[in-house]
């Protein structure tokens, strides 16, 4: 089964982010076990935060890829701004639900919303180090 959302190379990056987020969620869950024990609040909070983060990332990818099809720069900017409002409304609603409803752990709802920037930065560092290592190997294997 192949992941296909935008039909571009963006899909590969989205899949890469979602794999890293799954690992991040698992790590957060394992780190909270000694503190909370096995708690459905933690699991539901992580699921809610991850769903909001996933919706944010997917809507961002979709809006960026399709904004160029709007015909003019002004219409493209309006299109991107409308998706911006939608994305932040979704994240705000998820955060509000995480803080209001007792079935969600509020911290575990918030943490996945930080994943994209953190994980994408770490993946960039990893890619850079791998590139440097391959460049070093080319220089010294001559």
Image (cartoon, helix red, strand yellow):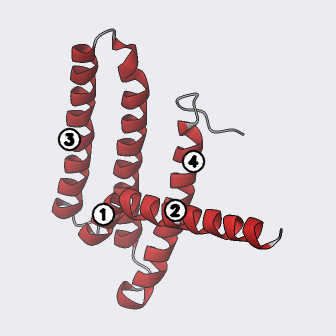
Residue that extends furthest to the top in the rendered view of this protein = 71
Residue placed under numbered mark 1 in the picture: 109
Residue that extends furthest to the bottom in the rendered view of this protein = 34
**Secondary structure category for the residue under label 1:** helix
Q: Position of residue 26 (x, y in %)?
A: 51, 71
Q: Report the Cα–Cα distance between label 1 and label 4.
A: 21 Å
- Residue positioned 47% across, 66% down in the render: 122
Marks 3 and 1: CB-CB under 8 Å? no
Instruction: Give the mark nearest the N terminus, 2 or 1.
Output: 1
Q: Quadrant of residue 118?
A: bottom left
Instruction: Give the mark nearest the N terminus, 4 or 3.
Output: 4
Q: Nearer the viewer, mark 1 or mark 4?
A: 4
Q: In this image, 14 relative to 45: left or right?
A: right
Instruction: Give the mark nearest the N terminus, 4 or 2.
Output: 4
Residue placed under numbered mark 3 in the picture: 89
Determine crowd level at label 4: few under 14, some 14-19, many 20+ residues with C-alpha closer than 10 A. Answer: some
Marks 2 and 1: CB-CB under 8 Å? no
Along the line of sight, which residue is nearer the eye, 98 or 64? 64
Q: Quadrant of the C terminus?
A: bottom right
Instruction: Give the mark nearest the N terminus, 1 or 4.
Output: 4
Q: Report the Cα–Cα distance between label 4 and label 2.
A: 13 Å
Q: Report the Cα–Cα distance between label 4 and label 3.
A: 24 Å
Marks 1 and 4: CB-CB under 8 Å? no
Q: In this image, 126 relative to 115: left or right?
A: right
**Secondary structure category for the residue under label 4:** helix
Along the line of sight, which residue is nearer the eye, 31 or 57? 57
Determine crowd level at label 3: few under 14, some 14-19, many 20+ residues with C-alpha closer than 10 A. Answer: some
Q: Quadrant of residue 29?
A: bottom left
Query: Residue 123 has which mark?
Result: 2
């Amino acid at each position: 089964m192949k992941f296909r959302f935008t039909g571009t190379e963006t899909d590969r990056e989205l899949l890469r982010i979602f794999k890293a987020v799954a690992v991040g969620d698992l790590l957060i869950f394992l780190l909270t076990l000694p503190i909370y024990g096995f708690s459905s609040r933690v699991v539901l909070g992580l699921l809610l935060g991850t769903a909001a983060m996933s919706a944010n990332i997917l809507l961002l990818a979709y809006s960026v890829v399709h904004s160029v099809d709007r015909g003019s720069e002004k219409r493209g900017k309006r299109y991107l701004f409308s998706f911006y409002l939608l994305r932040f409304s979704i994240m705000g609603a998820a955060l509000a639900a995480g803080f209001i409803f007792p079935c969600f752990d509020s911290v575990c709802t918030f943490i996945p919303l930080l994943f994209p920037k953190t994980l994408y930065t770490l993946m960039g560092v990893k890619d850079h180090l791998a590139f440097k290592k391959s460049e070093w190997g080319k220089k010294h294997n001559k």
